[in-house]
Image (spheres, rainbow, N blue to C red):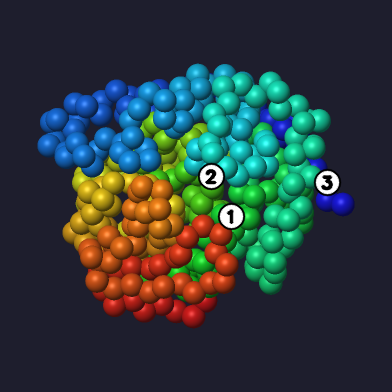
Amino acid sequence: MFPLVLPSHTRILMPDAIERSTEIAARVASLVETRTGYIRDNHVPADFALPDANWAYDARNPFLQLYRRVVKCDAEAIGQLRGFTVMFSGFNLYEMALGPTRIVERLDGYTDAVITEALSRNLPFIEAWQRQIANRPERMIFRPPRRFGEIGHEVQGVIVNYNTWAYQERINLLIDSGIVAYLDGCFEDRGKLRVLEIGGGYGAIATWFADAFPGLSYTILDIPECLLFPALYLSLPRPKTPVAWGLEPVHSGHRFTPNYQAAGLTEPFDLVINTLSMSEMSESQVRYYCRLMRSHWLHGGGLFFEQNQDNRSHGMLSAQEIIAEELPYRRSLDAAALAQGMAKIWSCHPISLPEP
């Protein structure tokens, strides 16, 4: 049997963790507070800049509840950050359960004994994950930090749970499509690599990129409240990695940019990523992002990788139907039994990728 990894094992607070977290929270709070003024002064369309559709700016919206809880930066919020990320993954980690998002204000009830019982439901994810990483080099495996109250089973030195498996699926798509080989070529040619993620979740994909491509420039563009989570998840384990905010330039390291400043990002990117959230946006928001890709982000020949579900049956939209009207070139990624939506590569130029 694989060893259990429980919150008591990973609830690690380095000596300066609370102080650094408070500084990060203050930067995020500033982005929230200046949103209205920025939208007004820069004539940003409100139907794009303000959260909408599944992320509508409503006081009861789960992402706002999570933000208000974690922004306090107490020992529980930082030590067990992963217990507060259900909104981004759709998975209640401490209950090992998919389903409707249930926001928990405090984690007192999730003792090691309770989580040990929940982890009995983790075994299918271990088996699926082992199939995913078969014959993959170490560099291509997502390894969640042994921090933030992460839980699961330890398999080959990796903490495995539903999220480990789900993010590895997306990484495998990047590998098998030839995108990783393409990015390696970009770095070899220019000595730098630029990636933009629209909607960064709690920072899992960005964590893998930081491990796999040392020295890359990685920008996360999201609702400002949501930026708090990846900023903590990425920055605390990497205190020496440069961090930029808003439209500050970033040559290597991470940049956290609020969605309302999207039009201010006028540089090209080698890769733009979105997973799951575009089909939770409004149509005008999806089209706005596509226009920015055409005018700036993909102008230098970059690629847009996305994996989204068709959410029309839930009263939302199919992002891929809209993107097809905005971006001229696409390639579907054929993969059996994808867990969360179909994946496609888009570009403003004919798509030519090296063999993986």
Label at residue 89? 2
Q: Is residue 49 above or below residue 178?
A: above
Query: Is residue 43 something that shows in the picture?
Result: yes
Q: Amino acid at mark 3?
A: Pro
Report, in whole angstroms, how far the alpha carbon at label 2 lies from the one at label 3.
24 Å
Q: Which mark is in front, 2 or 3?
A: 2
Q: Amino acid at mark 2?
A: Ser
* Marks 1/3: CA–CA distance: 21 Å
Where, by quadrant of the figure, is residue 131 drawn? bottom right
Count residues near mark 2 (Cα–Cα under 10 Å), then give few for <14, some for 14-19, many for 20+: some
Above or below 278: residue 70: above
Which numbered disc covers residue 166? Answer: 1
Mark 3: which secondary structure? loop
Sequence-wise first label, 2 or 1: 2
Is residue 277 at least partly visible in the picture? no
Label located before the other in sequence (1 or 3): 3
Q: Are marks 2 and 1 in contact (CB under 8 Å)?
A: yes
Q: Which residue is tagged 3? A: 3
x, y (%) of residue 273?
40, 56
C-alpha separation, residue under disc 2 versus residue under disc 1:
9 Å
Q: Are marks 2 and 3 in contact (CB under 8 Å)?
A: no
Choose between 104 and 210: the one closer to the eye: 104
Mark 2 and mark 3 lie on one chain; the one further toward the N terminus is 3
Residue shown at the point (61%, 38%) measured from the top left? 92
276 displayed left or right of 150 = left
Q: Secondary structure at mark 1?
A: helix
